[in-house]
Amino acid sequence: MTFFLASTLLIIAVSFFVSFQSAATAKKNVILGVTIPREVQGDLRVRDIVSRYKRANLLLFFAALVGGILIALPREASLVFLLLTLWLGLLLLGGNMILGSYSQSLRDLKAQEGWYMGATNTVSVDLIVSREKEKMPVPRLWFLPPVLAAVGLLVWGGSRDNIFFGALACGETLLFYLLWVLSARERARAYSDDTEVNLAITRLSIRGWTLCWVALANVHSLLLLFSALFLRYSETGSQGAVAALISLVTLGSVVMMAAHIRRSQNRILNSADSILIVDEDDYWRGGVYNNPHDRRILVEKRVGYGQTFNIGSKKGKLLYYGIITAVSLLVLGVLFLFVGLDTAQYTLEITDSQVIVKAPLYGFAFSTGDVENISLMNELPRSTRMNGAETAQYSLGNFIVTGFGQSKLYVYKNSPPYIAIQLSDLYVFFNAKTVEETEGYYRELQELIP
């Protein structure tokens, strides 16, 4: 198992564990997704249900770690990706099943004891907060630096790598801006009869989340700019480290901001003299909020960190199912891409004036007049991937090869010999699936040298 794959699986498993484990901590009178009065949260029966839930979630975490080992067994990238997708699905399903089971136990106890709180179809609004909340978001002008960085990457040099990083920066900036807009439009709910309490709670949420999205937009653009610069001027790869760093920064920022907002809001509510509580348990199922009486598009999650969509609203439903559809199509597209890469054959088309390397995504052609030397190697030097695909079976795309510098690799690993073609500004390494085919290409290429 590669370090990158192992660290990715560990980050995902820990993220799921922390997210589901957060359900066991009271959040605005909600435990395990169930609204219960504060004075009964220490009841022995409630504590027993919460303790058993924690143990079950811990067992799921260890099972996820064991299951993650199986993902690295296949050599084909398509099978690894398929197993990873199934692992993620089972992890999400298992977490929701455990939460649903213990949540239902707590609901049954709540119904047995009559621990119902407040109205069920009412969302109170503080009109003073509604007037003031426009002043609460972080200014949208803070998105200007990531926009400039994205545009700069698109126009800088015009290389394929820069265009890729620029397009990615544009997409991420747009996504974070949309999240900023949704967070800035948070409804001014009344949590107390005291307007100052409502102002403080709403300000914490709007200010905190808009700051989070602005900060992430700036950090992501800087990291992508750094990656593009590193790719252009350095002889070592950085994509894996940058991708891992971006994931950690994003996850850490969301978790820390959500925890800060939750702690601060709970502290304010605990000190308030009167609290308005609405029992919305019937509108939450499987972590999804469906309340047609609430016009909000984004609402704070009851379990985990961050926000989720209210599919009771038209826009919320459109965004929720649109994202699910887009992610499903993306997963299928990536799976078919990996299948294509795993089953592809690299071939050479050699003419008197040109050599064309036929390979998926990273095909390449060069003039025969640019060929300076051709050699046959029994061992492939160490290489660092810059922009391409690499598995235990093959290396495809742009690499930095030790002792050779910038190179293009079209090789099946552990299948010597390898043809090294020296051009004026880079090297091309190539081999076919069989020794006979590789040696045949080598003899044809030799004829191009005067």
Image (cartoon, helix red, strand yellow):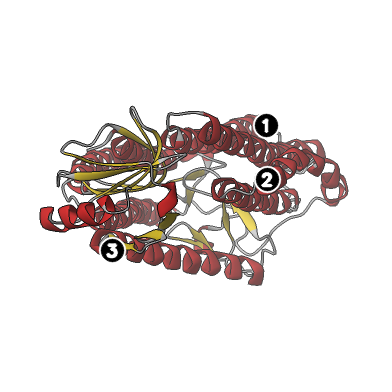
Position of residue 171 in the picture relative to residue 441 (left or right): right
Q: Position of residue 212 (x, y in %)?
A: 65, 38
Classify mark 3: helix, strand or loop: helix
Amino acid at dot 1: Ile
Amino acid at dot 2: Ala
In the picture, the disc for residue 268 is 1
Near-viewer residue (35 or 423): 423
Residue 85 sits in which quadrant?
Answer: bottom left
Disc 3 from disc 1: Cα separation: 54 Å
Q: Image point 46% across, 56% down: which residue? A: 287
Amino acid at dot 3: Val
Residue receiving disc 2: 150
In the picture, the disc for residue 26 is none
Q: Image point 28% across, 31% down: which residue? A: 382
Classify mark 2: helix, strand or loop: helix
N-terminal of the pair, mark 2 or mark 1, is: 2
The N terminus sits in image quarter: top left
- The residue sitting at the front extreme is 450
* Vertical order, 389 against 89 (above or below): above
Residue receiving disc 3: 339
Evaluate if marks 2 and 3 touch, with contact meaning CB atoms under 8 Å apart: no
Residue 326 makes an appearance in the image = yes
Disc 2 from disc 3: Cα separation: 32 Å
N-terminal of the pair, mark 2 or mark 3, is: 2
